[in-house]
Amino acid sequence: MTVHTSQPAGSKDPASAASSPPALELINISKRFGAVQANKNISLSVPAGTIQGIVGENGAGKSTLMSIIYGFYEADEGQVKVDGKVCTIRSSQDAIRAGIGMVHQHFMLVDNFSVIENVMLGAEGGALLRQGREHVRNELLRLGREYNLEVDPDAIVGELSVGLQQRVEILKALYRGARILILDEPTGVLTPQETDELFRILFSLREQGVTVILITHKLREIIDATTQVAVMRAGEVVAHRLTAQTSKEELAELMVGRKVLLQVNKADAQAGQVLMEVSHLCVNDAQGVRRVKDVSFQLRAGEVVGIAGVSGNGQSELLEAMSGILPVGSGTITLGGASISAESPKDPAQLRELGLAHVPEDRHRMGVVTAFSAKESAILGHHHYPEFNGKVLMNQEAILSSYKEKAETYDIRPRDPHLKSANFSGGNQQKIVLAREMEHDPAVLLIGQPTRGVDIGAIEFIHQRIIAMRDAGKAILLVSVELEEIMSVSDRILVMCDGQITGEVNASEANERTLGLLMANAQQEEVSA
């Protein structure tokens, strides 16, 4: 991804902006939930017409702070000032009236409504909907021209690309008068090209005097896009930096409190025999729609194969068919001498006996049972093994011992084995799943979105474990929407678009532009240009 962030002509310079009141000022904001101090004496000053980055690990207090600014929570102590004036924000309506808008990580759109209907929703403008509709149309066209946010007002939102849906969310906020725009992890489902376009939009907003607060765990995006950055740790702001005067390495260390290895150190892969093969595989989803279309590849011992692609292009269905969750439509999967096909299916338990382990993309839906204790979630799928069973009842001592060992090795927090899985953070739930699947010595590991929602320190650990498994002769298939992760961890990269493999690249030769074009299924000539 190449984003040029030099100060555009006519945009506000941070130094000159300092002479006027900050667009947003937080003064000693504190918020407690029972015994948990989520925010502690947070002070932050955001000049008008700048892009403010906020970074921090899971549980650092970023979401709580944004929820206070946008009115989902009310601070226990402290003040919020907008344009130099104290502002009482008890609801999102108060925030909107104060000129604050928010684009959530998961879009708040109705798929079968048009763009106009989504923008109008909650702001219909009175009883005469037709009159209100025309006003919205005219405003959308004006805002589109002014901020480079053009989108067809009559398009059905569910038929738009993810990048255009995000434009609709931004337009919705601007239509409601937002002068301060909060974006929460806005690039999680975008291609590199869509990310570039989003940042161009943000720079255009900045030129027009809109203040942007960007929350992202992608440090490169902070460096590329922001004017200044605040680092949060354990509910406090521990550092303020002008972006031009910091680095990814320094920000990572400030977030975690220790030096963090951002690049994966690994030797060249020593690929061995084929342990799993997919041949002309076709898979339909639960609704009968074909999601995987004639896909073929091999997984070899001692190699990590990455699959890159925008979410929703068949990667999930491919993983679920390879792990026995979805049936094979046509084609074959070969593992451990067994052939899996529509005529000869195997379920996940049978595939596990053949040496397969699977870390699912959605840990809540498939990885853990949130009502179970941590020690119970940590043996799911392996609970019938003799080591966990006595003559009549399950061997609780063995289960407890197994969990304690995993919790220590994978730094699962808290260590309490009896705590319900639902009460662990997303990152620690992920560690429970990873420990369960990695520690049973599989021959082949299928792993989907391994670091989704995981702290930067834990990402380092997870990547090291994946490489250690590779070096121990395991075959690993890694599916991730994070291109940096795919390029850093993989030895060979396959790219999926619309259910097909659109290209294969050696990781040592990969770059985001090439992968991004393949993710959009661009012509091979363009990729080679």
Image: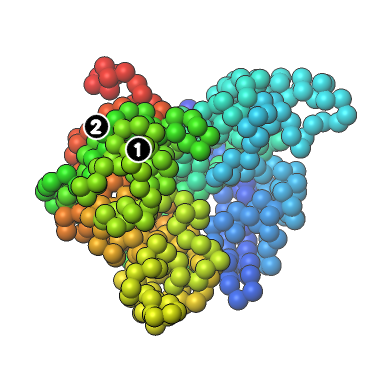
Q: How many marks?
A: 2
Q: Quarter of the image holding residue 443?
A: bottom left
* Residue located at (63% from left, 55% from top): 67
Tag 1 and tag 2, C-beta contact below 8 Å: no
* Residue located at (34% from left, 64% from top): 435
* Residue located at (44% from left, 29% from top): 290
* Residue located at (42% from left, 64% from top): 380
**Of helix, strand and loop, which one carries label 2?**
strand
Q: Amino acid at mark 1?
A: Glu
Q: Is residue 52 above or below residue 195?
A: below
Give the residue number, with chain letter if any, for mark 2. 504
Tell me the number on the disc at residue 29: none
Question: Which image quarter is the N terminus in?
Answer: top left
Q: Is residue 63 above or below residue 486?
A: below
Question: Which image quarter is the C terminus in?
Answer: top left
Q: Is residue 152 visible?
A: yes
Q: Give the mark nearer the N terminus: 1 vs 2.
A: 1
Q: Residue furthest front?
A: 343
